[in-house]
Amino acid sequence: MHYAPFLSLLEEKIVSLIDLKKDLPAELYAPQQYILSLGGKRLRPLLAMIGADLFDGDIHKAIPAALSVELFHNFSLIHDDILDKAPLRRGQKTIHKKWNTDIAILSGDALLVRAYEELAMSDEKSLRELFVLFNQTAKEVCEGQQEDMNFEKIPRVSVAQYTEMITKKTAVLLACSLKMGAVSAGAKQTDARKLYECGKHLGIAFQLKDDILDVYGDKDKFGKQEAGDILSNKKTFLLLKALELSNARQLQELESWLMKKDYKPAEKIAGVKKVFEKLKIRAVAEQEVNFHFETAMNCLSGVKAGNKKKNNFRTFCEELMQREK
Amino acid sequence: MHYAPFLSLLEEKIVSLIDLKKDLPAELYAPQQYILSLGGKRLRPLLAMIGADLFDGDIHKAIPAALSVELFHNFSLIHDDILDKAPLRRGQKTIHKKWNTDIAILSGDALLVRAYEELAMSDEKSLRELFVLFNQTAKEVCEGQQEDMNFEKIPRVSVAQYTEMITKKTAVLLACSLKMGAVSAGAKQTDARKLYECGKHLGIAFQLKDDILDVYGDKDKFGKQEAGDILSNKKTFLLLKALELSNARQLQELESWLMKKDYKPAEKIAGVKKVFEKLKIRAVAEQEVNFHFETAMNCLSGVKAGNKKKNNFRTFCEELMQREK
């Protein structure tokens, strides 16, 4: 992968952010170090570095932005895992399980503050712009998370509402990361904005791809329970689109599966997938992924940056989209 | 009160921060508006305004700082109330009781981000300094809260550890508020630093006064259960100092009350207070309050600002200290 050197630089910075010899009390800092050390793709900070690299800027200027988006992402994971009652994160115990909910709340708060501490180290020239963008993004992520929680409690959600929600919950942070890198490197407003749109559509494409992989992915590679979303009635693009496209009989069939309390998992999965197949939902979803991916690539094409740099980024995005897990 | 016009200006700004017609989803914003509308002394934002006023600066320049410290304070109340399992805040239901814990976590997060949004509106000249100070303070508040939680679980805490904890949990935010106001108004570094120390010692004095009032305050005016701290074995200055000053017999007596599971509340209060009285704990605590208050006033005296302005602030602090609730 072309960006391997960026990744090693980031990894080194990220794991040394917390120093348990100095950062006390340990109850507050050990959970922060724990979640940062669980790894992950480091996609957000990498996008910040790429955003700077595109403009031949000194990528080191984007490090405060890169670290701040990674710290923010980890803060949001800690608190979301509490809300989702998730026992595992990246195959390891979540913080509220390994410690307790009080510690998860407080160490999450402290990690959010830490994200702002990194951000405050940005260059004078871009500080306020980065700060305002980061705030706006953080606010939207909170709104997206709340909307996601609301969706669980209302009977019908439109595909448009769903897209709006995943845009806020997931996509804007990728957009923000890319734009923050660009702004750190002194990119022009018009290019920075195009990169924001690029990141946003990439983010939507990734999330929709996730929805598809949950149902149609190779479950060993994907590392999750097969079709967990179907079993939990999760309002994904696939289900919501199916509900929109169904005729009366298909709607009845889908809804009977959604309402059934007592079922064999394999039967429910097969039943819902049968309706999906009649409606060609997988193809519809893949078209939607492609639409957002192509929109992202068009935004990238419009950015005034070296073609080689843009091609490196394009290849990186394509590889990300081809993941089967 | 000399600062009544500042307070009305602040109150107007604070209650209009959230607009439930625009700020959606309501589940995220209604709790924020609710806690901001519960009132309180608005001490922190007022200190920010006073910090600016001392230097004849345009107090309006301190408004972003003032709002950000008030929003931060309210964020910390929401999350602390979850950790403390508190059912009431200012006589009204806490957010996790009125809504639920998930909503309290997420609306608290959003309120912290909102604090940073206000901060980002500060003048170019002071933005980074305010940002760094705010971050440092927010971090210390989290550390103080964690230390407070830790203290509940360890058998002995020294008075020095306790003072360190209340400094972080309570005093640094008052210090930060005053200094942010001063910095916003363009005060010199040396004066801003003195005001920080002034605010810090004021904060310690207030917290110790709280500890005294819990045991010796007029319970109707104080509005809390009489000597609730004694009943809950809370490690306050009074108890910790008593444990330090006790002879072997007094120590045994105190510890037997601390360990007793079955007691009549009035008897436990009387028993502990009897030891306090033998050790003259109230006088020791009042000396400590006076020490910090005088230190604060000395720091204020050293600030290069108009005497009339300084006297107004001194009078305000004295009135605050004389509260019996």
Image (cartoon, coloured by chain):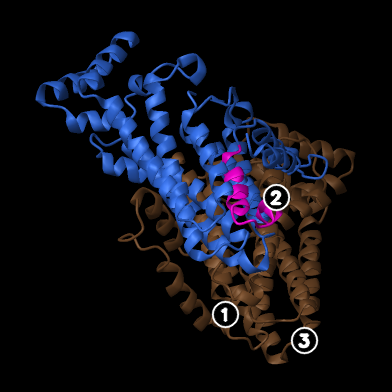
Chain colours: A brown, B blue
Looking at the image, is A177 positioned above or below residue B199? below
Disc number lying in front (1 or 3): 1
Image depth: mark 1 or mark 2 in front: 1
The magenta-colored residue range is: B42-63
Q: Are marks 1 and 3 on the same chain?
A: yes
Is A252 in front, or is B50?
Answer: B50
* Contact between labelled residues 2 and 1, with CB atoms less than 8 Å apart: no
Q: Is residue A44 magenta?
A: no
As shown in the figure, which amino acid type bears the numbered disc 2? Gly
Q: Nearer the viewer, residue B39 or A277?
A: B39
Task: Identify whether A299 is placed above or below A137.
Answer: below
Q: Which quadrant: the C terminus of chain A? A: bottom right
**Which residue bears the numbered disc 2?**
A144
Write down the residue under mark 3: A304
User: What residue did someone put label 1 on?
Assistant: A61
Which percent across, then down, holds residue A250?
83, 42
Task: Residue type at mark 1: give it.
Answer: Lys
Could you tell whether A211 is left or right of A253 in the image?
left
> Label 3 amino acid?
Lys
